[in-house]
Amino acid sequence: MPELPEVETIRRDLAAIMLGSKIISVDIMSPGSASHSVAFFKKELVGRKITEVGRRGKLLIFRLSPNAGKRMDYIIVHLKMTGQLIFSGKKDEVAGGHSRNVKAELKDLPNKHTRAVLQLADGGKLFFNDIRRFGYIKLVSKKELEDVLARSYGPEPLTSTFTFPAFLYALSRTNVKIKAALLNQKLIAGLGNIYADEVLWEARLRPDRSTQSLKPAELKKLYNAINRIIKLAIKKRGTTFSDYVDSRGRSGNFSKFLKVYGRGGEKCPNCHNPLKKAKIAGRGTHYCAVCQI
C-alpha cells in the first residue's frame, strides 16, 4: 500500500496537471467502489472544476469549485492495496499507486480494473483503477470531510499539529506494541509497514516493545526519527517495489536508503548481525535484535 511519501508524490504530480480542470462527464463502472449512485456523481460533478488536490495521511482529497445546488464539496480517494490513479491527456500520461503493467494500461483504458472515469474539458481523463476493489472514491461535503478527518486521522508528520507534546499524548492513550501504534492512523496519520520498520530502526527501538515501556529520551528519538525518515522519503519520491509507481510512471528511489524493511536475513547496516523478520501487529516486520532494544 502506498504510504504518506508515495501519496504525497501522487498529490503533487496530479496537482501540477489537474488544477482548474473542469469535469464534463463521469462514468462509474463499479458501483461498489463508489459512495453514491452514478446519477448522483454526475449531478454533483459535471460542470465543476478541481480547485485543489490535497491529502491527509494516505487519503487524496480533490476540492471542487462552488456551484449552486450542489451539496458535495470534495472527491476523496483511497487507493488501499491495489488502487491506482491514471491521468491520460494530450500532453501528460501519469500514474500513481499500484504498478501493475502501467505502460500497458495507459494504452488500454478503460479496462477490466477501471472503477471510475472523470472526463475533463481539456481532453484529459482521470481513471481510478483497482484490481482487488479495496479502494474507494467518495463524494463528501465539507462537514463530512471534517468529520472523517477528525474521527479517523491523527496528527501527521512534518505538519504544525505533529508536535512532540501531541505525539506524547497520542502514545499515552495506548498500551500496545509500538509497531501497532505507529500503524494506527488515528494516532499518527500516514505511516505504514515500510516506514514504521525504518523509523523504529532509526530510533533503535524494538517493534515489540510496549508504548508504555518507552522512556522520555526514547520517545524523543522516535519522534525525531519519524520526521527525519518521512522528510527524506518525500524528497526521494517514496519507496518503489513491484506494487508502486509514482504519478508520472517513474519509480521512487528511497528504496536505496532502506535499512531493514524487506531485508530479513541480511546484515544490519550498523552492527552487521543478521536482521530478523517476525510477524508483529499482524504485519511482517523487519528489525535488528542487537541494535534495537
Image: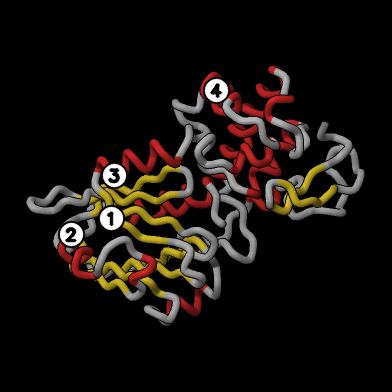
Give the residue at mark 1: 139
Residue 8 visible from this viewpoint: yes
Along the polypeptide, which appears first: circle 2 or circle 1?
2
Residue 55, image x, y percentages: 40, 45
Q: For this rendering, which residue is in front, 102 or 208?
A: 208
- Amino acid type assigned to the residue bearing label 2 in the image: Glu
Disc 3 from disc 4: Cα separation: 26 Å
Give the residue at mark 3: 144
Q: In this view, does 93 lie to the left or right of 293?
A: left
Tell me the quarter of the image containing the C terminus. Answer: top right
Disc 2 from disc 1: Cα separation: 8 Å
Along the polypeptide, which appears first: circle 3 or circle 4?
3
Residue 92 visible from this viewpoint: no
Disc 2 from disc 3: Cα separation: 15 Å
Is disc 2 surrounded by few (<14), some (14 to 19) or many (20+) residues within 10 Å? some
Q: Is residue 236 left or right of residue 73?
A: right
* Residue depicted at x 44% and y 76%: 113
- Amino acid type assigned to the residue bearing label 4 in the image: Tyr
Is disc 4 surrounded by few (<14), some (14 to 19) or many (20+) residues within 10 Å? few
Give the residue at mark 4: 169
Residue 176, image x, y percentages: 67, 35
Q: For this rendering, which residue is in front, 181 or 106?
A: 181
Give the residue at mark 2: 44
Q: Is residue 138 above or below residue 145?
A: below
Query: In which image quadrant can residue 148 be found?
Result: top left
Which of pointers 2 and 4 indicates the residue nearer the eye?
4
Along the polypeptide, which appears first: circle 2 or circle 3?
2
Give SS at disc 3. helix
Count of number-bearing discs: 4
Along the polypeptide, which appears first: circle 1 or circle 3?
1
Q: In this view, does 136 lie to the left or right of 259?
A: left
* Residue depicted at x 65% and y 41%: 180
